[in-house]
Image: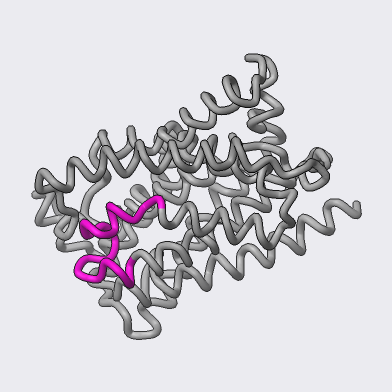
C-alpha cells in the first residue's frame, strides 16, 4: 500500500489530557450547531436535495469549523509553535502510494455498496440516469456515465473536495484522534465515531441523507461515521498523515455526490446506499482488510 516505511505512532503512550479535547469538542459543536441551527430556524431543509446536488458553499464552509478549532486549540491552549503544528496535527503528506490507492479503492467501495443495495432490492436501477438528464436538460447515456463521469469523479473529485474534506480531517483525524488514543484504540475509535456522527445531527434533523427519519438517521449516521471513520483512522495512524485523511474523505464525498445515487435512485435511506447499512458493512469490511494489509506492511 506504500513504498515508504510508516512512521510509528506513539500517541497511545502519551497521557490523556481531557482539557484540550473538551474545549475542541465544545467549541466545534457550539459553532457548527449555532450556524446550522440558525439556518434551519430560517427554513432550511434538505428533504428534496438528498442525492440530487452537492452541498451549498456555506455547508462546505462549515466543514472547516473542526479544522479551524483544532488550529486554535493547538496554538493557544497547547501552545504549539507554527512549526510545531506539523507534528501536532499530523500535517505531512507521506508517500503517494495510498493516495493513488484511494482513487481506485473508494469508487470500488461505492460500487460494492450500491451493488449490494440493488441486489437486495433496496433500490431501482437507472443506468441512463433519466432524472439527472431531465434536470440538466441533456441526455446522459450509460457510456457517458461510466467512461467520463465516473473517471472524472475518481481522479478530479478528490482534488476538488480535498479543500473541504481537509477542514474536517484536520480536526477529527489531525487533532482529536491522537489525543484520544491514550484511552486505547477501541475507545478512541468509538468516541471519535460517535462525536463525528452527532456533529452532523442538525443537518440530519433537517432532512439530509435520511429524509423523514431524523432520529433513525442520526443513529445511522453515527454507525456510518464509526465504520468509515475506522478506515480513515487506520490510514491516518499508519501513515501519520491527516492530509491523507482529508484526501480520502474528499474522494468519498466525490463519489457520494457522483453518479451512484442517480444510477440507483430511491435507495432505502437506512438500509441501502452509501449512508445506510450497506455502507456500514462495506466500510467495516474495508477496515478489516486495511488492518490486515497494514499489519503485514509493518512486519515487512
259 over 11 or under it: above or below: below
Residue shown at 29% from the left, 75% from the top: 268
The part of the image, by quadrant, that contains residue 105 is bottom right
193 sits to left or right of 274? right
Would you say residue 244 is visible in this rendering? Answer: no
183 over 80 or under it: above or below: below
Residue shown at 14% from the left, 58% from the top: 48
Give how far across and how far down residue 236 sits, in percent: 66, 45
Residue shown at 70% from the left, 33% from the top: 94
The part of the image, by quadrant, that contains residue 242 is top right
Residue shown at 34% from the left, 40% from the top: 32
**260 or 9, which is in the foreground?**
9
Would you say residue 277 is visible in this rendering? Answer: yes
| Residue farthest front in this picture | 19
Give how far across and how far down residue 22 sits, in percent: 54, 42
**265 or 58, which is in the foreground?**
58
**147 or 207, which is in the foreground?**
207
The magenta segment = 199-217
Give how far across and how far down residue 14 sits, in percent: 79, 41
210 sits to left or right of 65? left
Amino acid at each position: 500500500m506504500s513504498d515508504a516505511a510508516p512512521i510509528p505512532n506513539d500517541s497511545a503512550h502519551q497521557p490523556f489530557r481531557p482539557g484540550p479535547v473538551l474545549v475542541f469538542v465544545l467549541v466545534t459543536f457550539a459553532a457548527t450547531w449555532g450556524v446550522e441551527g440558525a439556518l434551519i430556524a430560517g427554513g432550511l431543509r434538505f428533504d428534496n436535495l438528498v442525492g440530487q446536488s452537492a452541498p451549498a458553499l456555506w455547508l462546505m464552509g462549515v466543514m472547516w469549523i473542526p479544522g479551524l478549532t483544532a488550529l486554535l486549540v493547538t496554538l493557544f491552549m497547547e501552545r504549539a509553535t507554527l512549526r510545531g503544528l506539523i507534528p501536532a496535527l499530523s500535517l505531512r503528506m507521506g508517500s503517494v502510494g495510498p493516495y493513488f490507492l484511494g482513487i481506485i479503492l473508494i469508487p470500488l467501495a461505492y460500487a460494492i455498496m450500491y451493488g449490494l443495495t440493488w441486489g437486495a432490492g433496496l433500490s431501482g436501477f437507472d443506468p441512463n440516469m433519466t432524472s439527472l438528464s431531465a434536470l440538466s436538460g441533456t441526455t446522459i447515456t450509460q457510456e457517458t456515465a461510466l467512461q467520463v463521469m465516473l473517471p472524472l469523479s475518481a481522479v478530479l473529485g478528490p482534488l476538488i473536495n480535498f479543500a473541504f474534506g481537509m477542514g474536517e480531517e484536520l480536526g477529527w483525524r489531525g487533532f482529536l484522534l491522537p489525543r484520544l488514543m491514550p484511552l486505547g484504540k477501541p475507545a478512541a475509535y468509538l468516541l471519535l465515531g460517535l462525536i463525528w456522527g452527532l456533529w452532523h445531527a442538525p443537518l440530519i434533523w433537517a432532512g439530509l441523507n435520511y429524509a423523514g427519519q431524523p432520529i433513525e438517521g442520526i443513529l445511522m449516521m453515527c454507525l456510518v461515521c464509526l465504520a468509515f471513520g475506522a478506515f480513515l483512522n487506520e490510514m491516518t495512524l499508519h501513515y501519520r498523515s491527516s492530509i491523507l485523511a482529508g484526501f480520502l474523505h474528499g474522494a468519498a464525498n466525490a463519489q457520494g455526490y457522483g453518479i451512484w445515487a442517480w444510477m440507483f435512485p430511491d435507495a432505502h435511506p437506512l438500509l441501502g446506499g452509501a449512508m445506510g447499512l450497506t455502507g456500514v458493512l462495506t466500510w467495516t469490511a474495508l477496515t478489516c482488510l486495511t488492518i490486515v494489509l497494514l499489519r503485514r506492511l509493518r512486519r515487512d
